[in-house]
Amino acid sequence: MRYPMIRTAAILLSAITLVACSSTKKREPASLTKVEDKIRVESVWSTSVGKSETFVMRPILAGDYLYTSAGNGTVTKVEVLTGKKVWEVKAPTDISSGPGSDGNVVVVGSTKGVVYAYDSDGQKIWEEKVGSEVLTEPLVLGGVAVIRTIDNRFVALDAKTGKRRWSYVRPQTALALRTSFAMVPIASDAFITGFSGGKIGVMGLASGGVLWEASLAYPKGFSEIERMTDVSARPTLLGRRLCAVAFQGRIACGDINSGTFTWSKDFSSHTGTAQSQDFVFAADEKSHVVAYKAADGVEVWRNETMTWRDVGEPLAVGKVVVMGDKQGYLHFLEQTTGTALARVRVDSSAVDAAPIVASGLLIVQTRGGSLSAYRPN
């Protein structure tokens, strides 16, 4: 029963996409207006790490190195400062998730439900079947690799041996997004993640128990498609402040310790939030970028110049908020006003994941396989 439900969800989500795209006039991406650069964004290095295919591949930083994966099974270790490839290996099957790593072990999931682990020298140390496709990048923390499968199961494997430690099965909703549901560490022994049905919760690393769970959004509407409310995007933390957003739901911020949200607004996004000390940023399904006051959720500004450009996950850094789009551009907006400060093009393919900040560089991976580093000045 598990697999037919997944296929049904995938088919219906394809139908949603087709319906949304049926009016080319409405879905036509906004033309780019000229930006007079107020900051200089210097290209430092760029290398090819393999195409993501239909998956979102997010590089991960571990010490002075980046680890990446590609749809054809390629896993690569790259020096942060130079972009030099330290090693590149090929998994036995196609890969459907970005990598997870603690710097000692690199773990990736596959379309066949097999998980592969490599040591810091690129040698495969184990592989383990987890039953179904893995779209979420593994979380490697405290000697454990947590795997989340597409059928809503969490499996914890020993990071050194692949031996199963625990598993947790999450109840299924009638429909769910066929996408990665991020897992974010919040301590050495716990992580936060979203669930289908509009819920978010903290899970313990030792046993897989749910430490707390809260409703971020509530399903509404008559059809199962209308009632699909998933918290798939990556939650963000700044101190104790937790912010998250749901597809066809709400954006909200609150306290990570209690799981209590202090404010919320109707919002729909599957790309996530970014936080600065004073603001929370998110892009909705139309690619309208919105800034809210972090303290009370009052809307500060709204930028609609990138309508239907399918902007990806945002990153707040310094005085800017940065996000890519489906045509390979990186957009730099001023945090206080939403004004465009600069724009650079990585390549001609989509930038889904937020850039990574490392050693003064902004590093981004595109679906076309470019891994590129920039230095804003």
Image (cartoon, helix red, strand yellow):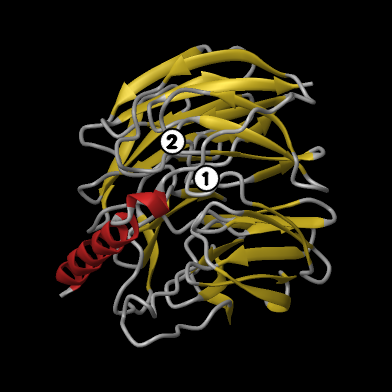
Along the horizontal axis of the image, is 110 left or right of 26?
left
Viewer can see residue 188: no
User: Do the CB atoms of the residues marked 1 and 2 lie less than 8 Å apart?
Assistant: yes
Count neighbours of disc 1 (C-alpha within 10 A) and say few if under 14, some if 14 to 19, many if 20 or more: many
At label 2, the amino acid type is: Ala
Foreground of the two, 219 or 241? 219
Q: Position of residue 8 (x, y in %)?
A: 19, 69
At label 1, the amino acid type is: Gly
Residue drawn where x is 45% and y is 85% of the image = 220
- Res 185 label: none
Q: Which residue is mark 1?
A: 312
Query: Which image quarter is the N terminus in?
Result: bottom left
Q: Position of residue 5 (x, y in %)?
A: 20, 72
Q: Position of residue 280 (x, y in %)?
A: 73, 57
- Image position of 305 with respect to 261: above or below: above
Residue drawn where x is 41% and y is 54% of the image = 26
- Image position of 190 with respect to 88: above or below: below
Viewer can see residue 174: yes
Q: Which residue is mark 2?
A: 350
- Image position of 268 with respect to 374: above or below: below
- Location of residue 243 (image quadrant): bottom right
Residue drawn where x is 29% and y is 66% of the image = 151
